[in-house]
Amino acid sequence: MGFKQKKTNLMLEYIKDVLRYILFSNSDQNAEYDLLLKDDGMIFVPIYPITYVIDEAFYNKIFNVLNLALTPEYTLIRPLTMQVVVLETANLSQERGLFFPMRKGTANRLNETMEQIIQRFYQTGRIPIMDIIDWDFVKAPHAIITGVSGSGKSYYMKVLFQICSIIGNSIAIDPKGSDLARLAHKQGNEDIVIPQFISSGNGEQGIGGKFLQDVIKALKNIESIMYERQSQIYQNSDKVSTDYRELGFKPYFVFIDELAALLTGANKAVKDDFQNTLTRLIVLGREAGIYLILAMQSARAEYVPTIVRDSISLRIQLGRINSENTRFLFPELNEMPMVPMGGKGTGIISIAGDSRYSGIEPIATPTII
Ligand SMILES: Nc1ncnc2c1ncn2[C@@H]1O[C@H](COP(=O)(O)OP(=O)(O)OP(=O)(O)O)[C@@H](O)[C@H]1O
C-alpha cells in the first residue's frame, strides 16, 4: 500500500471515530454508512436499508462535527444547500452520497508588499485574496464587505482600491471622507465623492441630503457610461456572448464605503432614487465592466435591497461571526458555526459564480508590508 493510500485510510478511520458516538444513538448504525475521500471533499455514502433519517439537519450535524475535527488538515466549506452526488457503482444500495466540499490544508493570509500582490494579479488576471483564493471579478461581479467598527473593513477596502486603481478606473464614494477618500486623493485620483463640508472646511453643513444627491449624480454618470458601452458592444461585436473586454474597455470599479451612513436622514424620494440607480448598476453592470464594491456595518435589507444583495457575488463578513449578524449577508448559514482564523481582518467569505468555490469559508485579508 502506498504512503498516500495509507494516509487516506488513517484519515477515514479518524473521521469514523469522530462520528461514531455523536452521529447515532444506536451504535449498530455505524455499519450503515461508508466514507470516500476525494481531492475536493468527502462523500458520506449511506448503505441502504438504513435505520436513520437523512435530512438537512443530519447533513448539518455532520458538517458541524467535522468542521472543527478536521482543522487544520482540511478546511470544510459550508455549501449553500445539502449536496447529493451520484456514484458510479452497480450496487443499488450505495449509488448516492452526501458531498461535503473541503479544501486540503488551510488557505493562508497574504503578508506581502503591494507590488507582490499586483504581481500575483498579473500572473492570474484575478485579484488575490489569500494564497490560494482569488477573485475573478468578471465571472463573479461585485463585492460587499460587512463588519462592525474595527473589524478591518476600511483596511481591506484600501487594499482593494489600490489594486483596482491599477487594473482599471476607480471611483471612491466615502461619506466619512476618511481613509478611502484620502487614499484616492493621495493617488491623484479625481473621482472622489465626499461630503462638501469636508472638502470646503465648512463643518456646519453636516452630511445631509445634498451629499446623497451628489452620490446619485456620480452614479448616474457611471450609468451613462454603462449604457454607452452596452450600445457599443451591441453595435460592434458579432459574438453572441461577449463583454467589455472585447472592445478593449477597462473595468470601472465603484467603491462605496459606509453605505448605510449615506441613507440616514435622507428623504424617501432621494433614497429611492439612490437604491434604484444602485440596483440598475449592479444588475446590468457586468457586461459593461462596471463593478461595485460596497462596505457597511451590516447588510440589512433597508440599506441593501435584496435584489442588490443577491446579485453581488463576492461576500465578506469580517469580525465576530454569529448567527445574529450573519443572517443578512449569509442567510443560509443559520446557526452554522465556522472555525474562524482569528486576528485582524478575519471572517468568512463566499464567492458565487465561480466553480472553484462552493460555499462559505474562513478568510484573513492581506496584510500589506
Ligand atoms: N489584514 C490586516 N492586516 C493587518 N492589520 C489589519 C488588517 N485588517 C485590519 N487591520 C488593522 O485593524 C485595525 C482596524 O481596522 P479598520 O480600521 O480597517 O476597521 P474598520 O472595520 O474599518 O473600522 P471602522 O468602521 O471604525 O473604520 C486597524 O488598525 C488596521 O490597521
Image (cartoon, rainbow, N blue to C red):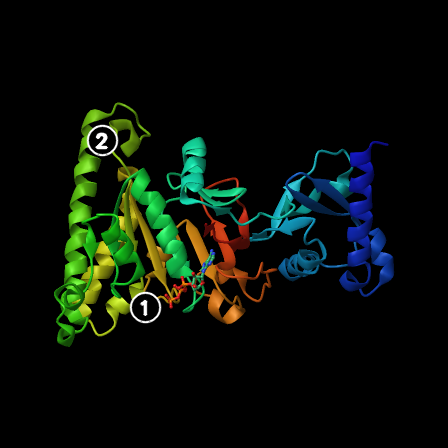
Is tag 1's residue or tag 2's residue first in the polypeptide sequence?
Answer: 2
Q: Is residue 147 above or below residue 89?
A: below
Residue 21, picture quadrant: bottom right
Label 1 – label 2 distance at C-alpha: 35 Å
Q: Nearer the viewer, residue 353 or 204?
A: 204
Residue found at x 28% / y 69%: 261
Q: Which residue is mark 2?
A: 233
Q: Nearer the viewer, residue 96 or 110?
A: 110
What's the residue type where badge 1 is placed? Glu
Q: Residue at x 27, y 36 (%)?
A: 250
Label 2 sits on what residue type?
A: Ile
> On screen, 211 above or below 99?
below
User: Residue 245: x and y, percent?
Assistant: 30, 31
Q: Kindly tell me whether mark 1's CB lies below 8 Å from ligand 1.
A: no
Q: Position of residue 2 (x, y in %)?
A: 83, 31
Q: Which residue is mark 1?
A: 302
Dot 1: element: loop
- Residue 275 at x, y = what percent? 25, 60
- Identify whether 210 is placed above or below 232: below
Secondary structure of residue under mark 2: helix
Q: Residue furthest front?
A: 369
10 Å crowding of disc 2: few (<14), some (14-19), many (20+): many
